[in-house]
Image: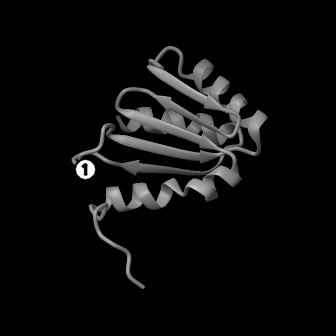
Amino acid sequence: MQTRIENITDVLDTNKAEGIEVFDLREKNYFVNYAIIASSLGARHTAALLNHLRKDLKSTEEFNHVDESGDWIVIDLGDILIHIMTPEYRVKYDMESFLTKLADGKEGEDEEA
C-alpha cells in the first residue's frame, strides 16, 4: 500500500501539484483507507494532473470512478480517494480539517475556542 501512495504522490509532485497531503483513514469507519489531497495551479492544471495520473498509473491502478468539475476532481481507486483542487476550492471546502479530524478520531467532537 505504501508503494501505491508513494507512486501517486510522486506523479502529483513531478507534475507540479502543490500541498500534497496523505490521510491514513484505516480503522476510522470511512469508506476508503487513504485520502490524498493536492492543489493544482488552476482548472486546466487540474485536468492535466488527472491525465498524468491515468497515464503513469495505468499499469498499476484501476480508476473505478472519476468525478470531474473544472475546479475539483475526485478519483476513486477503491481503497484510495484522490482530491485534486484549485487553491480556491481547497480553501472553500477545507477537506483537510474534515480528514484530519477523521484521521485523529475526532470527527464527532465540537470545536471550542
Seen at 38% across and 42% down, the residue is 34
Q: For the residue labelled by badge 1, is the local secondary structure a helix, a strand or a loop?
A: loop
Depth order, front residue of 64/2? 64
Which residue type carries mark 1? Lys
Q: Residue 9: name its quadrant.
A: top right
Quarter where residue 5 is shown:
top left
Q: Which residue, as the protein is rendered here, is positioned at the far bottom?
A: 113
Side of 11 relative to 63 (left or right) = right
Residue located 38% across and 39% down the image: 2
Which of the pair 68/53 is nearer the observer? 68
> x, y (%) of residue 37?
53, 46
Query: Circle 1 sits on which residue?
Result: 28
Q: Quadrant of the rendered structure where residue 68 is?
A: top right
- The percent coordinates of residue 78 (x first, y second) are 37, 27
Image quarter hosting the C terminus:
bottom left
The crowding category of the residue bearing disc 1, from other C-alpha atoms within 10 Å (few below 14, some 14 to 19, many at least 20), is some
Which residue is at the far top? 59
Residue 14 lies, with reference to residue 52, above or below; the image says below
Query: In which quadrant of the rendered image does the N terminus lie?
Result: top left
Task: Locate residue 6 relative to residue 112 in the image: left or right.
Answer: right
- Residue 108 seen: yes
State the residue at coordinates (62%, 38%): 12
User: What percent of the width, then of the height, locates residue 106?
Assistant: 29, 65
Residue sitting at x 59%, y 46%: 38
Image position of 21 with respect to 48: above or below: below
Q: Does residue 61 appear in this view?
A: no
